Amino acid sequence: MNTSKQSTEELYQQLRTLIELSETVVKDSRDIPEEQKKLYLSDYQRNVQEAKTFAEERNNSFLRQLQKEVLTPWYETDDADARKFWSLVTQKKLPLEQKDHVGIILKRGHIVSPDEYELVQDSLVIWQQEKRITADQAEDLNRMIAQYELKKIK
């Protein structure tokens, strides 16, 4: 079998599994309001169709981007649903791990990529509400956001 196709097939299968796990967690959640569940599940169905198209086109970069989109909400929070999701990922022996993105960024002291910038932008309030970061750390992250934006303007 052609390694390019094999790689695409592996990415596709991994993405399908991540979407299925996400659907399971969302459906079983006691914390997500029903209207929000419907939106998430609709998004997951769209993701399945996009994944199939990208796999047929052998477009690994778009499969990877779609995988990032599916994983982002699970990286943003550390609630019971996220813990369940990562537990299921571990049970399925997927080659992924939950990373402490906020800790990594704070330790490094700056944002290095558009993905990190977007994650911090989207997650800052959630991290504060969940008490994953202190007020000082929130200030540091806001400073890093501003520095990253200035760097992008130049």
Image (cartoon, rainbow, N blue to C red):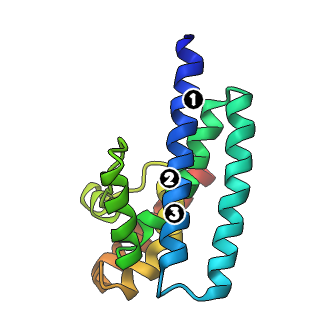
Say left or right for 14 vs 46: left
Q: Residues within 10 Å of mark 3 (few under 14, many from 20)?
A: many
Which one is in front, 82 or 123?
82
Which one is in front, 154 or 71?
71
Q: Which image quarter holds the N terminus?
A: top right
Q: Which residue is mark 3?
A: 22
Q: Callout 2, which amino acid?
A: Leu
User: How many callouts does the rendering have?
Assistant: 3
Q: How far from the left and from the top, in percent, is residue 11?
A: 53, 35
Is any part of residue 42 visible from this angle? Answer: yes
Disc 3/disc 1 C-alpha distance (Å): 20 Å
CB within 8 Å, label 2 to label 3: yes
CB within 8 Å, label 3 to label 1: no
Residue drawn at point x = 30 percent, y = 78 percent: 132
Q: Which residue is mark 1?
A: 9
Residue drawn at point x = 31 percent, y = 53 percent: 91
